[in-house]
């Protein structure tokens, strides 16, 4: 089984799936790579990643409610198989000191792609196609629980799309060098500092970059298209 293979693995090992399998609530306490090898991994909540551990996903084909519930260590997504990752939420919470790196692959989430990242965490996106069919892409919100990106976020490639807000940002430093962003509000900055030097931003029904409540945005590049409102709007923020 996959839990047994992870338990038996040495730090740095690669585990290659030889058949489709189902698993739930696997606690990753070391650095391991899982190579999907064309097979589907399914379950409800698949992984929790401990501090000082790293979970790397290669050729991942996953069907799950939540792929990673709690990330105290590191999660790296390098590639997915043809079917990609279909989930309710890819990662629910990245805690202080945790990190996520997305370098490629296709992720489709019914809720948020990443629900919340705490202050002191790092999220880096260099590639991949990230789609939320719900309201939020990076950062989420419900009547019972307010999420959002509170840690550092750096984006140099890939694409992010959602219905309402592609990036819901409250953190310390947001840097966007490139990428494609599509939503009613592709970028929403509620606090901290954002630097946008490139990328393509399309608002389907509102504002490409919305700055609110003390947020600061420095725009030196990029292409901004709004079909129904302003490209950049600031309310109690600074541009």
Image (spheres, helix red, strand yellow):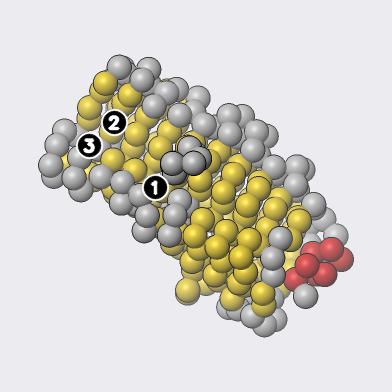
**Mark on residue 207?**
3
Q: Nearer the viewer, residue 80 or 230?
A: 230
Assess whether mark 2 and mark 1 are in contact (beta carbons under 8 angstroms): no
Local secondary structure at mark 2: strand
Q: Position of residue 130 (x, y in %)?
A: 42, 55
Residue at disc 3, secondary structure: loop
Quarter occupied by the C terminus:
top left
Q: Whole-percent x and y of residue 74?
A: 67, 46
Q: Nearer the viewer, mark 1 or mark 2?
A: 1
Q: Within the image, what quadrant is residue 7 found in?
A: bottom right
Which residue is depicted at the point 57% across and 59% down?
66
Task: Answer few, some or many: residues within 10 Å of disc 1's Cα (few below 14, many 20 plus, some between 14 and 19).
Answer: many
Residue found at the very far front of the displayed protein? 144
* Residue 181 visible somewhere in the drawing: no
Which of the pair 55/95 is nearer the observer? 95
| Residue visible at 39% across and 47% down in the picture | 136
Q: Label 2 vs label 3: CA separation?
A: 6 Å
Circle 1 residue: 136
Q: Where does residue 33 sit, x and y in percent of width and height?
A: 70, 61
Q: Residues within 10 Å of mark 3 (few under 14, many from 20)?
A: many
């Amino acid at each position: 089984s996959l839990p047994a293979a992870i338990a038996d693995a040495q730090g740095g090992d690669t585990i290659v799936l030889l058949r489709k399998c189902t698993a739930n609530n696997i606690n990753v306490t070391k650095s391991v790579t899982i190579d999907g090898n064309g097979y589907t991994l399914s379950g409800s909540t698949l992984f929790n990643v401990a501090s000082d551990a790293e979970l790397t996903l290669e050729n991942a084909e996953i069907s799950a409610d939540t792929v990673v519930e709690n990330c105290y260590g590191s999660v790296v997504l390098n590639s997915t198989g043809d079917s990609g990752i279909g989930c309710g939420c890819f990662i629910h919470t990245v805690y202080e000191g945790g990190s996520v790196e997305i370098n490629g692959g296709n992720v489709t989430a019914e809720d948020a792609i990443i629900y919340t990242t705490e202050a002191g965490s790092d999220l880096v996106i260099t590639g991949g196609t990230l789609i939320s069919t719900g309201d939020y892409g990076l950062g989420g919100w419900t009547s019972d629980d307010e999420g959002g990106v509170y840690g550092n976020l750096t984006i140099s490639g890939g694409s992010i799309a959602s219905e309402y807000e592609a990036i819901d940002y409250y953190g310390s430093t947001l840097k966007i060098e490139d990428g494609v962003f599509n939503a009613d509000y592709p970028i929403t900055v509620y606090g901290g500092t954002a630097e946008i030097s490139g990328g393509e931003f399309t608002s389907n029904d509102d504002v490409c970059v919305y700055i609110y409540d003390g947020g600061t945005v420095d725009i030196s590049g990029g292409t901004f298209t709004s079909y129904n409102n302003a490209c950049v709007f600031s309310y109690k923020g600074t541009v």
